[in-house]
Image (cartoon, rainbow, N blue to C red):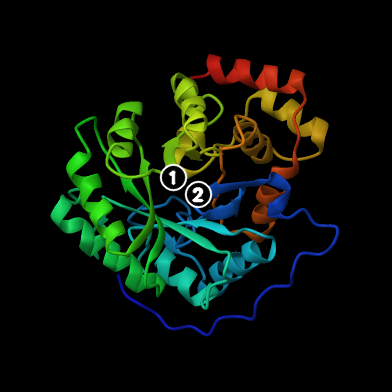
Amino acid sequence: MTTETTTATAGTAAATPGEIGAAAAGTWTLGDLEINRIGFGAMRLPQTGEAFAPDAVPRDRNDAIAVLRRAVDLGVNHIDTAAFYFSRLRSANELINQALAPYPDDLVITTKVGPGRAPSGDWLPHATPGLLRGQVEENLRQLGRDHLDVVNLRVVGTDSIAERFGALADLRAAGLIRHLGVSNVTPEHLEEARAIAPVVCVQNQYGIGVRPEHDAFVRACGEQGVAFVPFYAIAGTGRTAGAGATEHEEVRAVARAHGTGAAAVRLAWTLHQGPHVLAIPGTGDLRHLTENVAAGALRLSPDELTALDSLHRRTA
């Protein structure tokens, strides 16, 4: 990955009185850090098109910076990122640093470790316990921080995570990390992690029609006071490629009734799954950003929730 120096544009205007800000979604507390439930995911920021694609076109630097600054203007104070979010010319962490440092006092930046990518973009084997400190320090350097607010251990498979999570717990005790979370995990993983150190969030794929078998896990997280943070809540099975061109009629009907788009309905449905459920939609488009943030104010009726719940169970 190469670097490029570009002069950033000035910050965007603050939210106007008529605009819907992130506070409309309500708040949740990650450990001792209070955040608005509508946040921002940085995965799509370094490129246009599919994330991690070898031929992805790097996003215009000024456009990416404008989106980040606008998100904060709209009250977003929770940004999800990772050192492995980069394209040929862009790094999500470095964009966040350039756009937002010195950081607002209430801004919470969540990152994840475990996966790694070579400068070429090729994926590396997931980090062993001994390599996790290097990944944490890489995030610290790129973000320009002396500690990380929240670090998620990203997991692949069902093997024990005790040794790797224990390594992160040691870094927390050393002051490099404030709070810990887990990503792409099973209930058994969460139980294992919580026996080692406090866990403030679970970040798993979830949304309408995606993993209804995790419904009970989502509820259980709330009962334990652990935030549940769905990824691909809009994209669904489209994953890194984003949402598809077609949409289910149930979602379109609710969108028409509220005068909004399908993405907002999907986000609103996840937020309706419990006060502990957060949203981290990502985009490089200012209009989509505004629509995503406004989804936090969308209140679905019992009948609409019933229809969407039925779709959720039927389309998995």
Q: Secondary structure at mark 2?
A: strand
Which quadrant of the view contains residue 266? top right
Q: Label 1's element?
A: loop
Q: Is the residue 88 above or below the residue 200 in the image?
A: below
Q: How many marks?
A: 2
Above or below, 200 against 77 in this view is above
Residue identified by numbered label 1: 200
Q: Position of residue 150 (x, y in %)?
A: 41, 55
- Residue 52 appears at what percent x and percent y? 36, 53
Residues at discs 2 and 1 in contact (Cβ within 8 Å): yes
Which residue appears at 67% of the width and 60% of the height? 75
Residue at (39% x, 67% y) in the render: 91
The foreground one among 146 and 213 is 146
Residue lying farthest to the right in this orientation = 18
Q: Amino acid at mark 1?
A: Val
Residue 129 in picture, x, y percent from top left: 16, 51
Side of 146 relative to 247 (left or right): left
Closer to the camera in the image, 241 or 208? 208
Question: Does residue 20 sit above or below 229 in this rendering?
Answer: below
Q: Residue at x 76, y 40 (%)?
A: 260
Three-letter amino acid code of the residue under disc 2? Leu
Q: Is residue 25 left or right of residue 182?
A: right
Quarter in which the N terminus is drawn: bottom left
Q: CA distance from mark 2 to mark 1?
A: 5 Å
Q: Is residue 21 left or right of residue 76?
A: right
Label number found at residue 30: 2
Q: Residues within 10 Å of mark 2 (few under 14, many from 20)?
A: many
